[in-house]
């Protein structure tokens, strides 16, 4: 059985380096710097975990109707990788807007407030 695969979508300097954690847990990490690049990977193979930072759209809409950077990702997971566990990281000032993700019929596995510890992430990988 192959190792689980995790995509780390690193879009800010607040994103934690989980490389050692993934190695310890025998999880293959794919690091990308955009949702678009993550979507390319997801369309090729199902993914076990995605760790991504949440950004709320205060004044612009990401794709017309969306209010965050993650809704397009979640919609794509429904079709291409429906068993992926999504771990969302959010800044304190943005965590109150996480509810916008409820408009997509895809469950978020966990939400953690930045800065996070590797122990917090590890608990969601088990």
Image (tube, grey):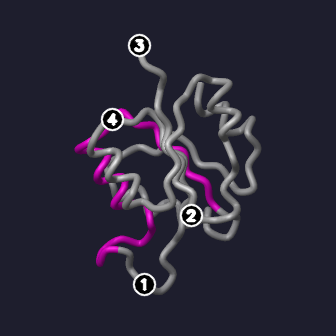
First along the sequence among labels 3 and 1: 3
**Real-space Cα distance between discs 3 and 1?**
43 Å
Q: Using the image, tell me which numbered label, if any, was put on residue 46.
A: 4
Per the image, label 1 sits on a secondary structure element best described as loop
Left or right: 75 in relation to 12: left
Q: Is residue 21 magenta?
A: no
* Label 2: which secondary element: loop
Q: Residue at (61%, 54%) from the top-left corner?
A: 89
Q: Say which mark, if any, is on residue 60.
A: 1
For discs 2 and 1, the disc positioned in front in the rendered view: 2
Which sits earlier in the primary sequence, circle 2 or circle 3?
3
- Secondary structure under tag 3 reads loop
Report the disc number at residue 1: 3
Front: mark 3 or 1: 3
In terms of depth relative to the viewer, which is nearer, 98 or 12? Answer: 12
| Residue denoted by label 2 | 11
Question: Local crowd at mark 1 within 10 Å, few (<14), some, or many (≥20)?
Answer: few
Task: State which region is magenta.
Answer: 63-90
* Depicted 10 relative to depicted 7: above or below: below
Image coordinates for residue 37, horizontal then vertical, percent? 39, 57
Q: Residue 50 location in percent, x, y?
A: 48, 44
The residue sitting at the top extreme is: 1
Q: Earlier in the sequence, mark 2 or mark 1?
A: 2
Q: CA distance from mark 2 to mark 3?
A: 31 Å
Q: Position of residue 69 (x, y in %)?
A: 44, 66
How packed is label 4: few (under 14 Cα within 10 Å), some, or many (20 or more)?
Answer: some
Q: Nearer the viewer, residue 103 or 5?
A: 5
- N-terminal of the pair, mark 4 or mark 2, is 2
Q: Earlier in the sequence, mark 4 or mark 1?
A: 4
Between the C-alphas of marks 2 and 1, the distance is: 18 Å
C-beta proximity under 8 Å, tags 2 and 3: no
Q: Is residue 82 magenta?
A: yes
């Amino acid at each position: 059985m192959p190792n689980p695969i995790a995509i780390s979508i690193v879009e800010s300097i607040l994103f934690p380096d989980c490389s050692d954690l993934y190695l310890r847990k025998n999880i293959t990490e794919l690091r990308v710097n955009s949702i678009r690049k993550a979507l390319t990977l997801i369309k090729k193979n199902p993914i076990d975990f995605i760790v991504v930072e949440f950004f709320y759209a205060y004044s612009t809409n990401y794709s017309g109707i969306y209010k965050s950077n993650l809704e397009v990702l979640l919609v794509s997971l429904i079709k291409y990788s429906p068993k992926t566990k999504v771990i969302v990281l959010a800044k304190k000032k943005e965590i109150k807007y996480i509810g916008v993700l409820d408009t997509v019929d895809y469950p978020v596995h966990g939400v953690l407030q930045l800065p996070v510890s590797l122990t917090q992430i590890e608990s969601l990988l088990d």
